[in-house]
Each structure stands twice: as C-alpha cells, then as structure tokens.
Amino acid sequence: MYETHEVIDYCIPSAEALAGVYSESSDGSFNTSNYFISMYEARWVILTSIGISLLVALLYIKLMDWFATVIAWITIAVIEISLVGLGYASYSYSSSIEATHGESTSQSETLFWVGISLWVIAALYYLVLCCNWRSLRIAISIIETAADFFADTKRIAFVPMFYFAIWCGVFVCWLYAVCGVASITSSEITVTDV
C-alpha cells in the first residue's frame, strides 16, 4: 500500500509514494522509467521555462518597439546586398573554375548563369523598390505603428499562456475520459476461446 490522493474519482500517488518508486544509482542520481515521475521531477523546470518565456516575450515586444523601423530597412538592404553579393560570388567562382580547367565546363556555365540571374533579380528588386517607394514607406510606418501598439499592450504576451492553460485543461479532460473508458472496458472484457 502507498499513500494516495483522490482526484476526480481516481487515486493519484502522493509525492512521497512516487519518491519511493525510483531507485538511487551509484552516482547518486535517481533513475526511473515512469513518465509521471519524470514529469513530477521536472515540474520546476517546466514552471521556470514558462516564466522565462514570458520575460523573453516582454523583451521581444520592447525591442520590436525600439527597432522595428531599423530592422525593416536593414532587411531590405540585406536582401539587395545578398542578391548582388551571391551573384558576384557565383560569377567569380565560375571564372576561377574556367581558369583552373583552361576552358568552360558545365559547372562554370551554370555558375555564370546563376550569377547573371541573381544580378537580374537584384536589378528587378531595386526597380520594384524605386517604383513603390511611397508604398514601402507606408508599410514600414504601419510596422512601426503595430510595434507601438504591441509595446503599449503588454498583456498581449499573456495570450499564448492563456491558450496554453486552456489546452492543458482540454488535455486533462481528454486524459480523464481515456482513463474512464479504459477502466470501464478493462473490467468488463473477458477473453474467451472461440
């Protein structure tokens, strides 16, 4: 016999009873193959992770408020520079392959056309930016406004935690239903030889 607590008509072992189930190994750590004991042992890690995630979410909201506009402009510049740089790298590598072999190979031709294609995409990207400059500035202003809204509404960080709590409740209800069905069917099923 071991100590239990009744939870929703089921007997749940107490923490002391769970501690008595696992054995201490030679290095002083406890080993167990029981899933529920592992969950019990990890309870503080899980709760600490929830707290850290809340702090990271609040920090992210604040950083987004401070740097949303800068990050949007940096992203646009990085895309353009990356396209030009990758085009140059492909073209340069194509030239080095030709110099090594003394003639054009299929790999050097492919790299040459990849470089040209990347430069064409970079030019088209630049043209789209120039033609839609006003729309781009409006979009970045909207991003900045959204960042200000999120920074002023810090409770938005609690929404994922709220839904997590709801789905934990749904999972517990589902688990209770599964246990109930399993306990009913296991006592009524008998195996007979045909």
Image: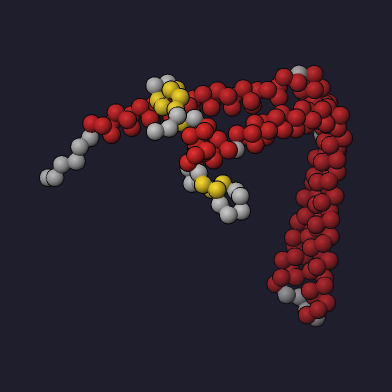
Res. 152 in view: yes
Figure check: 47 above or below 22: above
Residue at 43 percent across and 32 percent down: it is 2
Which residue corresponds to the image point at 70% horizontal and 72% vertical from the top-left?
106
In the rendered image, the quadrant that contains the N terminus is top left
Q: How is the image coloured?
A: secondary structure
| Residue 101 drawn at (x, y percent) | 78, 80
Query: Residue 81 location in percent, x, y?
Result: 85, 50
> Does 154 sit left or right of 28 as displayed?
right
Q: Nearer the viewer, residue 76 or 95?
A: 76
Left or right of 63? Residue 47 is left
Q: Quadrant of residue 109?
A: bottom right
* Nearer-the-camera pick, 65 or 27: 27
Q: Quadrant of residue 119?
A: bottom right
The residue positioned 75% from the left and 70% from the top of the image is 108
x, y percent for residue 194: 12, 45
Residue 140, can we see it? no
**Residue at left 68%, top 33%?**
48
Seen in the picture, residue 52 relative to 94 is either above or below; the reply is above
Taking the image as shown, residue 95 lies to the left or right of residue 166, namely right
Q: Residue furthest left?
A: 194
Tell which of 38 and 173 is nearer to you. 38
Q: How many marks?
A: 0
Place of residue 24 in the rendered image (x, y in percent of width and height, measured from the top left): 55, 48
